[in-house]
Amino acid sequence: MEPLGPGSRGPAVADVQAALRSLGLLAPGEEGPGEYDRATELAVRHFQQVRGLSVDGRVGEETYQALSEARWSLGDRLLHHDPERPMRGDDVTGLQERLLELGYDAGRADGIFGRETEAGLRAFQRDYGLTSDGTCGPSTLRALRQLGRKVTGGRPQLLRQSASFVDSGPHLIGRRIVVDPGHGGGDPGFTAGETTEADLVLDLASRIEGRLGAAGATVYLTRGRHQDPTPEERTRFANDARADLFISLHMDAHGSEHARGVASYYFGTGSGTSSTVGERFADLARREVVARTGMLDLGGHPKTWDLLRWTRMPAVRLDCGYLSHPVDRQLLLDARLRGTIASAVLAAVQRLFLPAEADPPTGTFVLPQRGALG
């Protein structure tokens, strides 16, 4: 769809305004009918901020999909698993969170009714004498609402994910890691002279691939020099590979002359629902890069971007600096600096699998490697 923004008019704008009114973000009569005015833009910005989307005040495909999903409340419709067209919405998120609170593994609360959610729902239905059909209808809803919370002492998904990683051991041998260089093909990303973001992140991804491979991991890149997979294709590749970890690499750009530094992103809504291992790895990777390069630390942030949401394993996007800033650009154009970033990512991956008592201070971990890695 064509993005909607200030100055847009027509039925699509009216539909967005109706969704915003239903969410209590736009008062009746506050906006111009069918006109994307200032009130509509502010309401969209507020919605994007709350939902963990990029805040630009415009409605593209991702924001429109999120608005559509936000209209559903638990009980509005029958919920079930459709492998061809998975059901999505806030009602699915509500069901997942309820099952997790009751101690059932429904996957992470991402608002997508997948196989894990169906399995968790069937287990709940069996335990409470309901027909175990994997469909959330009136009788299942009544049972869910009658029961109190069982899991205490932390978020259930945190307990499961953390336990799974600790139990799997500290080594990297046999780990499957997907490294995703952003852009590619006909999308060069930010361009400065003959240098493109797509080429630089592909070079960085290759260096990370070499270091992780030397440490025993099995590493897959989502693209080569001439491909530009869609977010769905990138995440499907990682899911089909049954990866343990997904790392997406970017280098940012901004119109502000002051924009510079390293940021990391993980799946999360900003209201407590998040990929907890993803959150930890985002923090580790960013801090390792900052400690080893001296670049500015812009923090870690929860986002509901499709690239982070659709993966079935912990996923992180690492923005390694601003090519639009002269200092960051000079650093990122240096092959030695990209090698340092690759070593930082290797250290972060290894630290993710170490028990807390064996985890070294940031910037100090060095993994023995075999051969020259560039």
Image (spheres, rainbow, N blue to C red):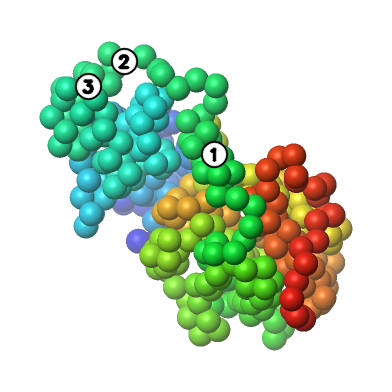
* Front residue (pair 148, 161): 161
- Rendered-image quadrant of the C terminus: bottom right
Asked if residue 84 shows in the view, the reply is yes
Indicate which disc, 1 or 2, sits on the residue closer to the N terminus.
Answer: 2
Indicate which disc, 1 or 3, sits on the residue closer to the N terminus.
Answer: 3
Give the class, few, some or many, for how many residues have Cα within 10 Å of label 3's Cα (few <14, many ≥20).
few
**Label 3 amino acid?**
Tyr
Residue highlighted by disc 1 = 163
- Left or right, 45 with respect to 360, comes to left
Residue 148, quarter of picture: top left
Residue 343 picture location, percent across and down = 75, 66
Give the class, few, some or many, for how many residues have Cα within 10 Å of label 2's Cα (few <14, many ≥20).
few
**Label at residue 128:** 3
**Label at residue 118:** none
Residue highlighted by disc 2 = 147
**Label 2 amino acid?**
Leu
Q: Are marks 2 and 3 in contact (CB under 8 Å)?
A: yes
What's the CA distance linking mark 1 and mark 2? 26 Å
Q: Is residue 277 above or below residue 26?
A: below
Asked if residue 67 shows in the view, the reply is no
SS for callout 3: loop
Residue 321 picture location, percent across and down = 73, 62
**Label 1 amino acid?**
Ala
SS for callout 2: loop
Q: Is residue 300 above or below residue 201?
A: above
SS for callout 1: helix
What's the CA distance linking mark 2 and mark 3? 10 Å
Give the class, few, some or many, for how many residues have Cα within 10 Å of label 1's Cα (few <14, many ≥20).
few
Indicate which disc, 2 or 3, sits on the residue closer to the N terminus.
Answer: 3
Identify the residue shown where x is 48% and y is 47%. 304
Identify the residue shown where x is 20% and y is 50%. 82
